[in-house]
Amino acid sequence: MTAVDTTITCSNPQCRVAETGKCLEGLSTELCQNFGKGQSGEPEILLDDSLDEEPQLQEIPREVLPDGEALKQNELSTIFRAVPTRLIVLIGVPGSGKTSMIACLLELFQGGARRELNFSRSKTLVAFERICHGGRTTSGGNTPEIERTRHGATHYYHLELHHSGIKERTAFLIADRTGEDYATLANNSDAITNPWEVNNADHVTILVDGERLIDKEEQHGHLSELKMIIRSLVENEEFPHAVHVTCVLTKNDLIQSTTSSNHIHALFENFVQYTRKIFSNSAGSVNKFIIAAHPDRGAPGAGMDDILYHWLTPRKYNSFEDTQFTEENIKQRAFWIVHKISYERPEE
Ligand SMILES: Nc1nc2c(ncn2[C@@H]2O[C@H](COP(=O)(O)OP(=O)(O)O)[C@@H](O)[C@H]2O)c(=O)[nH]1
Ligand SMILES: [Mg+2]
């Protein structure tokens, strides 16, 4: 039998949220009007029977705290509704530094604001902690270890920032799909069946592994593989209209410690030119950044501030107002409506 949580109440007698954890209306508990109220429709006040006291006049509102783990696709709508949100997709083969990049985002704010960007909140603190604990515990030591991304469905990390200059909040949802999944695209362009996060991304960030570029045996193979992944996604029309594309060269600390850093940066520049060409008709912009998210020595996150500022850029949504309704564009139309609502939301 399913256990009933007697601290959870709902004024709808048919709702079994206390038993199943699910709202009958399919709403989140913050949005449901009945959640937290007694069957009379009044907020439920649970009194301690052992104390014969006056009933309490003021009830502290019940709030269900998020569990802090990474979010699933069906948990994103409250974020999109709350503040302008950028959906960020990181594309890279395993080992290129995706998880390190996500992990260092939170670490960046441990010393306070980054220029005018302040940490506001995150619904996925536990997930952040999970992926960067290795880095943190060895931060006094040498090589940080980053928990490897597990195979499976795409998960999302949430980070909301406040820009003190323009007094605006923006949420980032950073999609984490295993690198293995993207790598399979290099050999089979249909390998990913539902790249929802790619289809709806505001920013696509392509990671070029600096460590592989150092290795003469690996550098060309690595760049060819990345090109094939991008070409597959472009040919299958997976990227949305006007997506912002960013090429990121990772692990620059390793590159700087070699004698061939100029040559490696030139290889990267070549790759950026290729990307510009391939996205020439479809992207909102193509930019490049060089980072060291988790260097072997020194502070994490070199180059990340610029990326954060860049990710604030909204995507220019195709309004669809002049386009025909088709089964193919229905998902993008629906998503555009949500974005439109969040951008046009009045000041609180
Ligand atoms: N030296 C150095 N190593 C890094 C950097 N970023 C990531 N790494 C290391 O590269 C390896 C793979 O990184 P990870 O983030 O797990 O890659 P992912 O598979 O793409 O998620 C890990 O051992 C990281 O510690 C960096 O900026 N400098
Ligand atoms: Mg990973």
Image (cartoon, grey):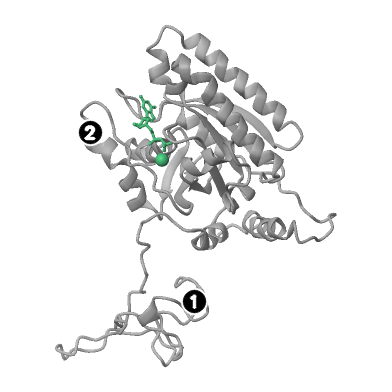
Which sits in the foreground, 57 or 172?
172
Q: How far apart, in angstroms, are the residues tagged by discs 1 and 2?
A: 43 Å
**Which quadrant: the N terminus?**
bottom left
Instruction: Identify the residue at horizontal 50%, vertical 44% (top origin).
Output: 181
- Tell me if 2 is positioned left or right of 71 in this view: left
Q: Is residue 219 above or below residue 346?
A: above
- Tell me if 152 is positioned left or right of 57 in this view: right
Q: Is residue 220 above or below residue 40?
A: above
Q: Is residue 211 above or below residue 85?
A: above
| Residue identifier under label 2 | 138
- Furthest-top residue in this view: 259
Instruction: Identify the residue at horizontal 35%, vertical 25% (top origin).
Output: 295
The answer to whether the residues at label 1 and label 2 have Cβ atoms under 8 Å apart is: no
Which quadrant of the render holds ligand 1?
top left
- Tell me if 280 is positioned left or right of 224 in this view: right
Residue 226, x across and y down, in percent: 57, 31
Label 1: how many residues lie within 10 Å, few (<14), some (14-19) or many (20+)? some
Residue 244, x across and y down, in percent: 64, 37
Which sits in the foreground, 314 or 116?
314
Which mark, by number, is residue 32?
A: 1
Q: Amino acid at mark 2?
A: Thr
Residue 163 in sight: no
Residue 36, x across and y down, in percent: 39, 80
Q: Amino acid at mark 1?
A: Cys
Query: Of tags 1 and 2, which is closer to the observer?
Result: 2
